[in-house]
Image (cartoon, helix red, strand yellow):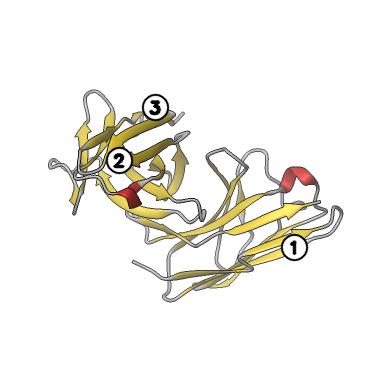
């Protein structure tokens, strides 16, 4: 069975610093996708970044990068140069079986000045 | 990417009633899904909305409680039937393009049942 684990319930980071949010996964599938979403207090789910299991290079999208270590089954999100607007819940997710997503429990990030 | 809208954005309903949530996409998509997020929790998949056929439900979710329609490739509805306070959640639709690629969510419907 597929499983996503986020072990950090909450993280604090100072503005302009980088922060890493941890995510490990478990699956017996060879083909899968890994996602990170941001959920502000409004409740919407904002897509941040995607990594395919066969992608050899780490995905990057602006200030977001995904540190993909396949052998360790980890897919950590790195946010560089944090901004106050980055304060939100962050969810790691994995796709399986025709695009179904399974989510981790989330990490609440708070950015302080 | 895709632009996804949901109606209503929020509602307060009395127990025992039903609410239908609409999800509209600005382009044809292969896959549409409905998720539930209970207060303070993560997202859980309710069902896959199949175009022109019955939805495929995940364990713990049944058609009588969450009937779903998908008449075409850009539109789907989820009904929450015979509501109880435990149904108070955010309900989100999402769309995918097949092949385990990027998946996008609508803005969500925040439901409170009193």
Spatial CA distance of label 1 from label 2 is 37 Å
Residue A53 located left or right of residue A109: left
In the picture, the disc for residue A73 is none
Residue where numbered disc 3 is placed = A8
State the residue at coordinates (87%, 54%): B16
Can residue A30 be spotted in the picture? no
Could you tell me which secondary element the residue under label 3 belongs to? loop
| Relative to B24, A74 lies left or right | left
Furthest-right residue in view?
A: B16
Residue drawn 62% across the image and 57% down it: B55
Check contact, mark 1 vs mark 3: CB within 8 A. no
Of badges 3 and 2, nearer the viewer stands: 3
Residue B111 locus on image (x, y percent): 68, 56
- Residue under label 2, please give it: A31
Q: Nearer the viewer, residue A77 or B22?
A: A77
Query: Which one is earlier in the sequence, the residue at label 3 or at label 2?
Result: 3
Q: Could you tell me residue A63's position as x and y percent? A: 20, 50
Circles 3 and 2 in contact, beta carbons < 8 Å: no
Outermost residue, front direction?
Answer: A113
Of badges 1 and 2, the one in the foreground is: 1
State how far apart marks 3 and 2 are (Cα). 26 Å
Q: Where in the figure is residue A79, as x and y percent of width and height?
A: 24, 42
> Could you say which quadrant of the image residue B102 lies in?
bottom left
């Amino acid at each position: 069975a597929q499983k996503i684990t986020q072990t950090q319930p909450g993280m604090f980071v100072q503005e302009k610093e980088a922060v890493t949010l941890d995510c490990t996964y478990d699956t017996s599938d060879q083909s899968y996708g890994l996602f990170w979403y941001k959920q502000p207090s409004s409740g919407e789910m904002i897509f941040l970044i995607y990594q395919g299991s066969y992608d050899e290079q780490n995905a990057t999208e602006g200030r977001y990068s995904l540190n993909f270590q396949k052998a360790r089954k980890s897919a950590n999100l790195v946010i560089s140069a944090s901004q106050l607007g980055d304060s939100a819940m962050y969810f790691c997710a994995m796709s399986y079986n025709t695009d179904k997503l399974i989510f981790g429990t989330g990490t609440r990030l708070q950015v302080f000045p | 990417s895709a632009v996804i809208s949901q109606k209503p954005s929020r509602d307060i309903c009395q127990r025992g009633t039903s609410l239908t949530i609409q999800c509209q996409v600005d382009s044809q998509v292969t896959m549409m899904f409905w998720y539930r997020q209970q207060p303070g929790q993560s997202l859980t998949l309710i069902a896959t909305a199949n175009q022109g056929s019955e939805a495929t439900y995940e364990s713990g979710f049944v058609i009588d409680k969450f009937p779903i329609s998908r008449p075409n490739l850009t539109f789907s509805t989820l009904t929450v039937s015979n509501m109880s306070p435990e149904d108070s959640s955010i309900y989100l639709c999402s769309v995918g393009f097949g092949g385990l690629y990027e998946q996008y969510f609508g803005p969500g419907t925040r439901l409170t049942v009193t």
